[in-house]
Image: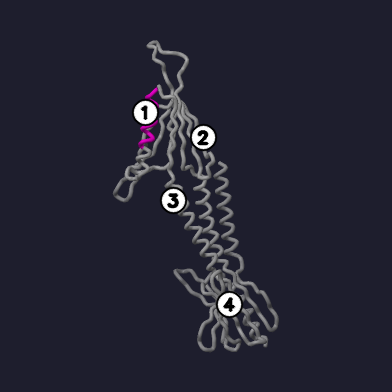
Amino acid sequence: MQQQFFYKGLFILVCLGIWLFATSPAFRILEQTPNKLVLHIRPTFAWAISTLLGGIALLFTIFTLQSAPVTILSCKHSIPTYSLPSHQELTSTNCELIAMSWLGTEANRNIFSKVQEAILEMKMNSYGYAQLARYRAIILTEKGNIAITDSYVSMQEPAYENMYNLVTQINEFIKNSLAASLTVQYEDKLLGYTGFFIAGCFWLITGLVLVTAPFINCSFDKKVDGVILERRNFFWKKAVRCKLNDIKAVNVESYSDEGNVNYRINLLLISGENLPLTQSLTSNWQEKQQIVEQIRQFLKND
């Protein structure tokens, strides 16, 4: 129950972060005077994407860390104080199953008695027209079945042989009433390795999105009759310069793709070239139109 609340809370925080970045204004005016206008453009869309990817990576990491790749089974025979008329003593097998997490802490402990036998439980998985049998080890008791391993494996996987040997050891101990105790350890780390690999991929993509997302400064300066458009990220920095008199028009460029319309601010030069303030197109036409009006107003005020 606590884990469900934790994952729901984390999911809500990730969604809230995505919404805040996606709706926050990308354009900020750093300086505005009669002779100078400086715009700062933040990669809010990239931040929203990285929040989504980082949230997925965090969920995979936490879920994998909470999984139990190591299972320790300890069993003992108990002999009742009474005897049957045939003088054959009944023995009962009692076991304790401890699941250890990746952090080496105890994730779960289960104590059960009157063990009957251990078996390989089969589950059929369909892959198109083909079906594949997969197995996991369980222990049958009078009160129900206890799963030793959570994941199912096929007979072709190396883990199947270990699982088969585990079941064999348990059944031999149950039949041998003279054996005092049995302690076996089973490791199933493939699922954890897969989870860490997926989490690592998402962490890597999140980092790449963050370090490659460009910050943009656009400076309009009447004193030097110049425009400096500077783009930079963690790896590079690039500046494009032109004169204020070279700007013929300022408009909001739109692009439609399957019904979705995105926009960016574009400076149209006298030479016919386009100088977009951002390489990518995003939504929020109203915000961009307001910035365009401010640039136009600045250029008119000579």
Q: Residue at x 50, y 87 (%)?
A: 272
On screen, residue 280 versus residue 141, left or right, reads right
> Which quarter of the picture shows residue 84?
top left
Q: Are marks 1 and 3 in contact (CB under 8 Å)?
A: no
Tell me the kind of residue under disc 1. Glu
Query: Residue 109, which numbered label?
Result: 2
Could you tell me how far apart the alpha carbons at marks 3 and 2 are, in whole angstroms? 25 Å
Comparing 288 with 108, the one in front is 108
Tell me the kind of residue under disc 2. Arg
Residue at the disc numbered 1: 172
Residue at the disc numbered 3: 194
Nearer-N-terminus badge (3/4): 3
Q: Residue at x 49, y 48 (%)?
A: 64
Front disc: 1 or 3:
1
Q: Residue at x 45, y 13 (%)?
A: 82
Tell me the kind of residue under disc 4. Glu
Front disc: 1 or 4:
1
> Under tag 4, what secondary structure?
strand
Front disc: 1 or 2:
1
Comparing 219 with 173, the one in front is 173
> Under tag 1, what secondary structure?
helix
Residue at the disc numbered 4: 230
Q: Which residues are magenta?
A: 164-177
Examine the structure image and report whether residue 165 is included in the region drawn in magenta. Answer: yes
Q: Residue furthest top?
A: 85
Tell me if residue 109 comes above or below residue 205 in the rendering: above
Could you tell me how far apart the alpha carbons at marks 1 and 3 are, in whole angstroms? 33 Å
**On-image quarter of the C terminus:** bottom right
> Under tag 2, what secondary structure?
strand
Percent coordinates x, y for residue 27 in the rendering: 61, 72
**On-image quarter of the N terminus:** top right
